[in-house]
Image: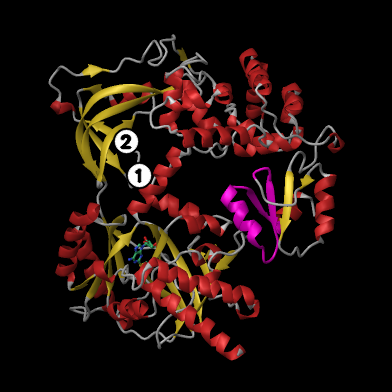
Amino acid sequence: MERDLARRVEKLREEIRQHNHHYYVLARPAISDAEYDRLLRELQRLEAEHPDLVTPDSPTQRVGAPVSALAKVEHAEPMLSLENAFNETEVREWEESLRNYLKVESLDTDFAGEPKLDGVSVEVVYENGVLARASTRGDGWVGEDITHNVRAIQSVPLRLAGGRVPALLEVRGEAIMRKDAFQRLNRDLLEQGEEPFANPRNLAAGTLKQLDPAVAKERPLDIYFYGTGRSAGIEARTQRELLAWLGELGLRTNVEMTAFGGLDAMLAAYAGLEQRRNDLPVEIDGMVIKVDNLALRERLGTRARSPRWAVAVKFPAQQATTRVQDIVVQVGRLGTLTPVALLEPVEVGGVTVQRATLHNAEQIRKLDVRVGDRVFIERAGDVIPKVVAVVKESRRGGERPFTPPERCPACDTRVEQDEDAVALRCPNPRCPARVVAQVEHFVSRGGLDVEGIGPKLIEQLVARGLVEGVADLFCLDAASLIALERMGEKSAANLLAALERARQPALDRLLFALGIAGVGQTVAEVLAAHFSTLERLGAASAEELEAVKGIGPEAASQVRAWFAQEENQALLRDLAALGLRPRTAPASAGAKGGEFAGRTVLFTGTLAGLTRAEAEARVKEQGGRILKAVSRNLDLLVVGEDPGSKLKKARELGVRIMTEAEFLERIGD
Ligand code: IVH
């Protein structure tokens, strides 16, 4: 019976692995999603009933608990970089240098020309076919342990497939995010009022460095493998065979985009790749040409930082020229005016570009950009393009220089020079453009986290005079919401419910939401933990603020200045009158407030360093409150070994999660 069960579990895993491979690596699913879900659910059920049967390489075990820090990992063989070549001559010189080094007339080998993926290089170690460890390149010798995040990448097998599994395999590849996934993610971030990522590489790097693998799970990363580090039992004589073998083991490679042949074939392949560059699903920044024959590579060896047997041929930067149709001015949350060039739509790097930031009037003066000018714009893998130069020869005389506005384009108030004397700002706190940006920030995820309200809706609310400041959000009613475009009864009710929930925010979230200059999420947390109530914070002098660990003189004076302004005091009074009550620490926490002052905390899983009762007592000593279940009112979930469903729920609700190690550090153990 037990044996049958174990066999069934192993069979399910094998089937699921194969389907994962079909779906994520080959992009050719062999069964329907519903059938796949059924297999996965059966495995999950059996494992839940028989926890002793759970193994780390089970497909159910991809996303584990957060780690407390990224450990350092030494690479058994250094991860080198590549020499660059920028044109055909340099490629030919490289080939010649190989012949000279070996003192031969001709090289007895083909070359492999692979796309140079623009991502993050990683190493993944398989021991007896099971994923044991993954790390970043770091400085080439020592990287960071990102095993928890790499496990969450669906196309990376937790167990190698096929019959020729080596005892040890250190595979190297490039972690990337596909362009479509990147664009989708950035759109979501923008809608939530958050900063988008500049390019897929930054997003991939940022994701792999997260402590909580749930983030990586949400972001569709991929790794394309192209080589090996120290390994035992490699069955390949050429790069061509190596890629084929890695593919057999279930690892994703980029053979489809790789060319093999002599040097001329490489140069032709490079030209083809550059032409197709923008149509490819992934960002590439060139082609890597490698000696195909692995034995010959051994003879060629490496220099200090790069192998002799490979060269990276880089693409030139992606530029285009287009015409500046207008230069408009955008107004930010704090009133800063940013000039933006509106462009005749043009394709650069596969993206249609219609706007480019010009940063400030000073930058415009330096470039001498005028409306009507033909300009060079550049995308260096970045999403926000830059104007890099003006084609002065194309001027016909009618071009109009940009005059910095004397009045705000949104509210017509006279603009002022910012303290740094570079930017202009609109000083009118009621400026509709500023209000829109403020409300977006107020309801953003790091702020009050109100669901169901995006930029379009906020613009409508402000344009119709329903919202003149953030406090007005709490005066909205169903009737006025339903009267808006694209707003049904259900969405109106949902929004009102979300606003109701937002009436009792944690203090740090409220501080962030208020949009005080210099108060980002971290400063907000420090201030909330130290002062525990809005009143105490508001009464603090600049000296008292500066004395707080983690608060610099700049932030201290900005906070002081914010509270000193009558209109901000009026805002706080309005918010209080409308029932906004930040959750604060109990009086016993003392004037200073403890580490958990005013916070609600819950523990899940087994703690290693202290008992649950001890941990809860420490939280209470430091002004915190223990909750019994995960809800929107929970501020912090502390996670021990084997956390249960609470972790999942907390993630869904966006509750902050802390590992036991972080918790111990916070309480000073
Ligand atoms: S081979 C000894 N192949 O480029 C180094 N690298 O500039 C062997 N890269 O750190 C690297 N695509 O992150 C190789 N097909 C490819 C690559 C590739 C991207 C990256 C890799 C490396 C960097 C070197």
Residue type at mark 1: give it. Answer: Asp
User: SS class of the residue under badge 2?
Assistant: strand
Q: Is residue 287 above or below residue 325?
A: below
Examine the structure image and report whether residue 141 is included in the region drawn in magenta. Answer: no
Please provide percent x and percent y for residue 621: 85, 45
Residue 643 inside the magenta-drawn segment: yes
Checking the image for residue 382, the label placed there is 1
Residue at 66% over, 27% down: 580
- Find residue 1 and report its image quarter: bottom right
Classify 480 as above or below 49.
Answer: above
Whole-Å distance between the Cαs marked 1 and 2?
9 Å
Identify which residue is drawn at 53% across, 76% down.
Answer: 57
Residue 422 seen in this snapshot: no
Is label 1 in contact with label 2 (beta carbons under 8 Å)? Answer: yes
Query: Which stretch is magenta?
Result: 632-661
Would you call the spot at circle 1 few (<14 residues within 10 Å), some (14-19), or many (20 or more)?
A: some
Answer yes or no: is residue 528 visible: yes
Nearest the eye: 479 or 181: 479
What amino acid type is highlighted by mark number 2?
A: Lys
Task: Give above or below for 129 relative to 569.
Answer: below
Lateral position of residue 407 relative to residue 570, left or right: left
x%, y% of residue 350?
A: 24, 47
At which x and y percent is residue 174? 39, 63
x and y, in percent, of residue 434 in the image: 47, 21
Mark 1 lies on a secondary structure that is: loop
Quadrant location of the C terminus in the rendered image: bottom right
Residue under pointer 2: 386
